[in-house]
């Protein structure tokens, strides 16, 4: 069986280079938001015209809002007002070491960001861990979300296929094993997730966000979201399937965690929604926004910026 995560460059386009994580941080600031475990400082960016249509980006595990850096220009060039932030325990946001992390609190904090920045109704774009936060936000107030874009993530807990390293970190020896995470092991895992080749530079910058303030040691605590997905499956799947505003699925089918098998479920449950599988001419894996930024940025930008009556779903 071919190893799509290490496909050679002659069979795939050259990867786009992400801006450095340090440069990404210069475009944002920190705000203090109250969550269930107290007050926390979150790194936040707002890009695009102040009067643009609001869009909120929710990133995945184990990285940060920096994941959106390559598609951001596609959105702001269309006049969208884009808010992106690092979830608690990720990137440049606070990373309390002994904190009990939960999706519920992440949703609280997202609402806190909206309140702090005076954001009312907003479109959402979510990936990986972020899709679960988005599902909880939809469960609370679906009318607040004007449009929804889903990228690869665990929408259905019964279809989630975590990597072996995720299963180990989620197990009883996770805290001990987390001390063995380094840039090399991180890069190896990322390459298993991506069907298109990732540059050493991009993986280095993604690692910088994760490892900031020793964030890699939090992986076992953050991975509790796997249990939360099972515990709240009915609530979150219902929120997903009952949402009736325009919806777009942008999917990398070669994703070993949530790829073609999840796309098949999406086709069954959402026969009239727009599902864009990224497999032609080159396959895409778990990180569509990094593996195919121009295509993904264009798809999302056009979907979010089109007039209400012209959205195809």
Image (cartoon, grey):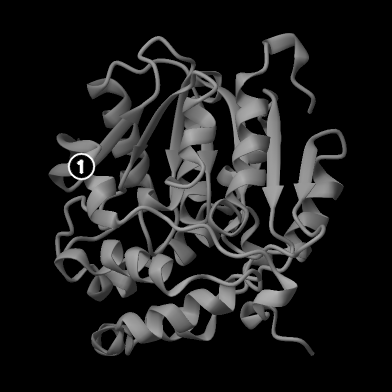
Q: For this view, does 214 lie left or right of residue 205?
A: left
Quarter where residue 174 is shown: bottom left
Residue 202: % across, % down: 42, 65
Q: Is residue 85 above or below residue 76?
A: below
**Which corner quadrant holds the C terminus?**
top right
Q: Nearer the viewer, residue 54 or 105?
A: 54
| Residue shown at 31% from the left, 45% from the top | 105
| Residue shown at 34% from the left, 87% from the top | 172
Residue 28: % across, % down: 23, 37
Q: Is residue 36 above or below residue 75?
A: below
Q: Is residue 34 above or below residue 105?
A: above
Q: Residues within 10 Å of mark 1 (few under 14, many from 20)?
A: few
Residue 67: % across, % down: 43, 53
Badge count = 1
Q: For this view, does 301 lie left or right of residue 219?
A: right
Whether residue 146 is visible here, answered yes or no, is: yes
Residue 277: % across, % down: 77, 52
| Residue shown at 45% from the left, 45% from the top | 133
Quarter where residue 74 is shown: top right
Whether residue 171 is visible here, answered yes or no, is: no
Q: Can you identify the residue that label 1 sits on?
A: 26
Indicate the secondary structure of the residue bearing disc 1.
Answer: helix
| Residue shown at 79% from the left, 90% from the top | 1
């Amino acid at each position: 069986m071919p190893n799509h995560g290490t496909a050679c460059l002659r069979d795939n386009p050259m990867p786009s280079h992400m801006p450095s994580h340090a440069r990404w941080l210069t475009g944002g600031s920190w705000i203090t938001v109250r969550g269930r475990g107290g007050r926390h400082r979150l790194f936040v960016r707002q890009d695009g015209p102040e009067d643009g249509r609001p869009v909120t980006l929710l990133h995945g595990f184990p990285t940060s809002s920096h994941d959106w850096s390559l598609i951001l220009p596609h959105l702001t060039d269309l006049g969208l007002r884009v808010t992106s932030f690092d979830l608690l325990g990720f990137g440049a946001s606070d990373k309390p070491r002994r904190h009990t992390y939960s999706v519920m609190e992440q949703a609280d904090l997202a609402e806190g960001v909206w309140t702090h920045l005076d954001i009312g109704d907003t479109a959402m774009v979510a990936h990986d861990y972020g899709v679960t936060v988005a599902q909880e936000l939809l469960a609370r107030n679906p009318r607040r979300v004007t449009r929804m874009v889903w990228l690869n993530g665990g929408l259905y807990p019964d279809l989630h296929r975590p990597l072996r390293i995720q299963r180990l970190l989620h197990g009883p020896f996770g805290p001990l094993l987390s001390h063995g995470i380094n840039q090399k092991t991180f890069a190896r895992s990322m390459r298993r997730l991506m069907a298109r080749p990732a540059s050493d530079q991009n993986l280095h910058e993604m690692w910088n966000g994760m490892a900031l303030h020793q964030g890699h040691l939090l992986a076992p605590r953050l991975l509790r979201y796997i249990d939360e997905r099972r515990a709240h499956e009915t609530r979150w799947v219902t929120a997903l399937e009952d949402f009736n505003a325009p919806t777009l699925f942008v999917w990398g089918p070669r994703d070993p965690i949530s790829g073609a098998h999840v796309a098949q479920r999406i086709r069954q449950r959402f026969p009239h929604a727009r599902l864009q599988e990224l497999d032609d001419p080159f396959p895409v894996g778990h990180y569509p926004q990094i593996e195919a930024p121009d295509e993904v940025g264009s798809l999302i930008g056009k979907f979010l910026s089109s007039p209400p009556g012209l959205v195809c779903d």
